[in-house]
Image (cartoon, helix red, strand yellow):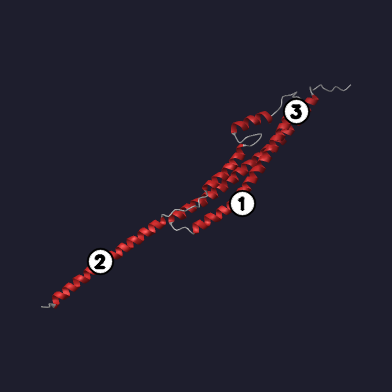
Amino acid sequence: VFDPQNYAQNLLEASRALQQINNQVQALQNQALMLQNMASNLNPLKEVSQLSGMVTSLSEITNLMNQAQGIAFNVNSTMAALSKAYPTSYPPGTGSATLTADAQQRWQNSMSAFQDTLKVQAQVVQNVQADTATLTTLTNASQNATGNLAVSQATNQLIALSTKQQLQIQNLMAAQYRATALDQARNAEAEQDGQTQFQTFLGANNAYNPQ
């Protein structure tokens, strides 16, 4: 016997069960999409690392700074060299040979410092030219990144590139200031040498007695 009420009840329950299944399927699909998005966000930046090249460039500048001639970039060495070749005064009677030798050493220190500055400048220019290609590569990688991790890695490398350029400028400024300071010290010592030679020439107060 067909029972319409029972049929309607069964149809309603079947409809509810089907709706629950559809909801579960939709939930599973949402979870799968979420996992795909998470996996995409965790995709690393592939084959675009420029960090080793940046470190190499900075190492080249560091080597040039460490090879500084005359007066090195070292506090103790600098103080020792200054006290030897750049004395605050010379004792009376200092011979011209000593004054000439010290003046020659100071001139050599100044020339070496300017040469070192030019070397650092040349290296920085070469690095900047290479940085143009590096910047293009990292910018393209950042724009084409497929996930947050890749974007973050590209951004970190761009920050590292900026830091590298700032360190280059600081090294260049240190080399330039060193050269300028040594040349100024040489000029100051030249005045001191002149006074010492003049006093040596005069000798004692009674060096010249008019007749």
Say what secondary structure mark 1 lies in. helix
Q: Which residue is mark 1?
A: 129
Asked whether the viewer can see residue 87, the reply is no
Q: Are marks 2 and 1 in contact (CB under 8 Å)?
A: no
* Other residues around mark 2 within 10 Å, as few (<14) / some (14–19) / many (≥20): few
- Identify the image quadrant of the C terminus: top right
6 and 166: which is toward the camera? 6
Tell whether 169 sits left or right of 206.
left
Q: Which residue is mark 3?
A: 196
Query: Residue 144, image x and y in percent?
Result: 49, 59
Q: Nearer the viewer, residue 204 or 96?
A: 96
Among the 4 quarters of the image, the one containing residue 34:
bottom left
Kindly indicate whether the residue at mark 3 contacts the one at mark 1 (C-beta within 8 angstroms). no
Separation of disc 2 and disc 1 at Cα?
Answer: 62 Å
Q: CA distance from mark 1 to mark 3?
A: 50 Å
111 or 42: nearer the eye? 42
In this rendered view, identify the residue nearer to me: 152 or 100. Answer: 152
Tell me which label, 1 or 3, sits earlier in the chain. 1
Is 193 located above or below residue 12 in the figure?
Answer: above
Question: Amino acid type of disc 1?
Answer: Gln
Find residue 21 and name its label. 2
- Is residue 7 visible from the viewing direction of this image? yes
Kindly identify the amino acid type of the residue bearing the numbered disc 2.
Ile
Residue 94 occupies which quadrant of the picture? top right
Please name the amino acid that badge 3 sits on: Thr
Report the quarter where the N terminus lies.
Answer: bottom left
Q: Secondary structure at mark 2?
A: helix
Crowd tier of the residue under label 3, counting other residues whose Cα lies within 10 Å: few below 14, some 14–19, many 20 or above:
many
* Relative to 139, 80 lies left or right: right
